[in-house]
Image: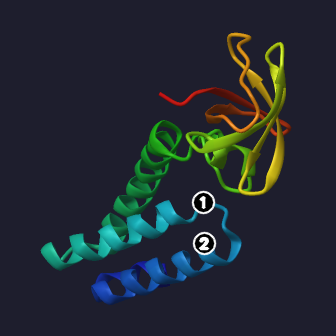
C-alpha cells in the first residue's frame, strides 16, 4: 500500500524517470520489448500533467492498460512496417549487387557465356538471351549473383 500512497501526490517527473530508466535498459539489452512500457510511462506523465489529481490505483491501472496496448500495437506496427525481418533488399556487404546498372568492358564471350571487366576486376558474365559480344565492347550489368553478372548491350 505504500506505493499507492506514494503515487497519490507523485509528480509527472517520476513517470518520466521511469520512462528513461526503461529506455536505458532497452538500449542496453536491445530486447525491443521494454520500449513499449517506457512509452506508456511517458504517456502516463503526459496524462498526469493533464489530470494531476489522478489517484494512485487509477495511475497503476492506467499504466498497466497503456503498457499492454502499447506493446500489442507496437508489435503489430513493427511486424507490418518494420525492417521485414531482415529481408530488405540491401546492398550492404553484397558487392555484386552494387554492380547492377554499371558499365563493363567485354573481355571474351562465346555462346552467351564469358567474362567482363568492371573497374579492373574480372567477372564471369552471361547474357540473359544468349547473345554474344566482341572483346572490348561495352555492356551494362542487369543482374548480379555472388559469382556471376548478367549483361545486356548498352543502348
Q: Height in image: 129 above or below 108? A: above
Picture coordinates of residue 20 (x, y %)?
47, 82
Picture coordinates of residue 143 (x, y %)?
66, 31
- Residue for badge 1: 32
Front-lying residue, 118 or 138: 138
97 vs 146, left or right, is: left
Q: Residues within 10 Å of mark 2 (few under 14, many from 20)?
A: some
Q: Residues within 10 Å of mark 1 (few under 14, many from 20)?
A: some
Numbered badge on residue 26: 2
Residue 18 visible in this rendered orientation of the protein? yes
Instruction: Provide the secondary structure element on which disc 1 rests.
Output: loop
Q: Residue at x 84, y 28 (%)?
A: 114
Residue 86 visible in this rendered orientation of the protein? no
Q: Height in image: 121 above or below 14? A: above
Task: Kindly give the residue lying farthest to the left in the view shown.
Answer: 50
Q: Height in image: 116 above or below 121? A: above
Q: Residue at x 45, y 57 (%)?
A: 67
Amino acid at each position: 500500500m505504500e506505493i499507492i500512497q506514494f503515487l497519490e501526490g507523485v509528480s509527472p517527473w517520476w513517470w518520466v524517470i521511469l520512462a528513461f530508466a526503461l529506455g536505458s535498459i532497452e538500449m542496453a539489452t536491445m530486447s525491443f520489448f521494454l520500449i513499449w512500457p517506457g512509452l506508456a510511462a511517458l504517456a502516463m506523465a503526459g496524462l498526469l500533467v493533464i489530470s494531476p489529481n489522478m489517484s494512485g490505483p487509477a495511475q497503476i491501472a492506467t499504466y498497466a492498460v497503456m503498457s499492454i496496448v502499447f506493446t500489442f500495437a507496437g508489435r503489430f506496427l513493427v511486424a507490418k512496417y518494420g525492417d521485414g525481418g531482415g529481408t530488405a533488399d540491401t546492398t550492404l556487404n553484397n558487392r555484386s549487387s552494387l554492380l547492377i546498372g554499371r558499365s563493363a568492358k567485354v573481355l571474351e564471350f562465346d555462346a552467351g557465356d564469358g567474362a567482363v571487366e568492371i573497374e579492373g576486376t574480372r567477372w564471369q558474365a552471361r547474357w540473359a538471351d544468349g547473345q554474344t559480344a566482341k572483346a572490348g565492347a561495352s555492356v551494362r550489368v542487369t543482374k548480379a549473383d555472388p559469382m556471376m553478372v548478367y549483361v545486356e548491350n548498352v543502348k
